[in-house]
Amino acid sequence: MPSQNPLQLDAIIIGGGIAGLWTLAELTRRGHRCILLEKTALGTGQTIASQGIIHSGLKYTLAGLMNPSARAIRDMPDLWKRCLAGTFHPDLSSATIRAESCHLWQTRSLRSRAGMIGARAGLRVKPVALTGDHRPGILRTCPGTVARLDEQVIDPESVLNALATPLRNRIFHIPDSALKSIELYPDYVEFTLTLSGEPPQLLRAQRLILTAGSGNAALRAQLGLSSHAQQRRPLHMVMLRGLADELPELNAHCVDGGRTRVTVTSAIDSSGRRIWQIGGDLAEIGVELDERQQIHRAAAELASVLPDLDLSSAQWATYRADRAEHHSPRTRRPSDISILTDGPVLTCWPTKLALAPRLAEQITRHCGKPQHPHSSDELPSWPTPPTAHPPWEEARRWVQTDPKVHHTPTKTELE
């Protein structure tokens, strides 16, 4: 039987990705007595799989129009920049910034040029056209506009650690087997947890906050709530690996009309090799392809949009990631964060990594004033979870493509 004296909390957060950790930091700062439970490793899933771009909204304005998506996200780069500088809360000054800005470049198509012009309207962060030596080396021969966009690129693993380190006594590794029951009442939630070697522990919280990404659906089902509130939009991401002196650093979007044809971000792996994560339309369209097909498609795309890039010695791998979001008609991407309220349960989706601060602020408004003393002395001494490793450190297989793979430009691309 669990203890008759429950651990009283203002909130229990389930899910230790960027959304859960940022929410924990904000609630704790405001005096709430709260804890976070993670069943695997911090950041597992969407956060650690992300490219780390703090989007400014440009990709949503490529057709030249401001829309709800752009308005929701356009203030995020400045907020993140202050946190990363340590001048705003939470303090992320210990995190790694991979790049202070991204670049944009165009294909030869007329649609691409129109999209770049349209992208300049209505944003806090706007593209700045570059010429000559101001362009990254790999983009100096691009026939169209190359621009700088002040969207920082962060290292997700280091941001997770920066958020978690000062809150370690509130973050617990709770595997599924330890969660014996969840009881949902009109004004609170009760948990019964049993960890190895310890008596059952009863937890009572005024709010249960679900920030578990794709895991939200199963948690809602366990609580007797609809699991159809969530949708998944899959990605098939590509990774390129090479020696740092052979594979140049690049953090950039290839803009083609109203779409982002490819998005490339760079990192260095544990062996000192350069890694490119490649997303954009390539990752969305490639969901139906197997690994071999997606790699060959990526090689052809890069040969088309970066013809000066030598891929003869590069190695390739892919990984799949699901973007979990609040359900919307025809599985469209929601334009903003989403919070679904069911009594004391808040089911939360940030939609984009950059929107985590906005989500955390809205969650704290839902939670109201703290109800319990802000003291960590009585919190249990349970195990803390590790932090997930980036996908290139987990990849089991890297392959080389045929260096003779070429792409024949279409008539439109040559215009």
Image (cartoon, rainbow, N blue to C red):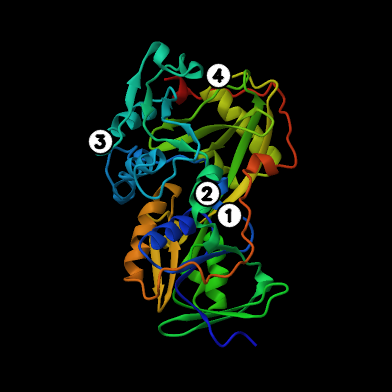
Q: Identify the residue at image location x=49%, y=75%.
A: 226
Label 1 crowding class (10 Å Cα cut-off): few <14, some 14-19, many 20+? many
Three-letter residue code for mark 3: Ala
Dot 1 or dot 3, earlier in sequence: 1
The mark lying in front, picked from 2 and 4, is 2
Dividing the picture into quadrants, the one containing residue 296 is top right
Identify residue for label 3: 121
Where disc 1 sits, the SS reads loop
Marks 2 and 3 close (CB-CB < 8 Å) = no
Q: Between residue 65 and residue 11, name the one nearer to us.
A: 11
Q: Identify the residue at image location x=54%, y=57%.
A: 168
Identify residue for label 4: 307
* Left or right position of 269 against 33: right
Measured from the top left, where is residue 131 in percent x and y?
Answer: 37, 14
Q: Quadrant of the C terminus?
A: top left
Q: Between residue 37 and residue 133, name the one nearer to us.
A: 37
Q: Between residue 108 and residue 47, name the one nearer to us.
A: 47
Dot 2 or dot 3, earlier in sequence: 3
Dot 2 or dot 4, earlier in sequence: 2
Measured from the top left, where is residue 122 in percent x and y?
Answer: 24, 39
Q: Quadrant of the N terminus?
A: bottom right
State the CA–CA distance, disc 4 to disc 1.
39 Å
Dot 4 or dot 1, earlier in sequence: 1
Tell which residue pokes out farthest to the front in this image: 377
Marks 1 and 2 close (CB-CB < 8 Å) = yes
The mark lying in front, picked from 1 and 3, is 1
Q: Is residue 314 above or below residue 175?
A: above
Q: Is residue 228 above or below residue 157?
A: below
Identify residue for label 2: 160
Identify residue for label 1: 42
Three-letter residue code for mark 1: Leu
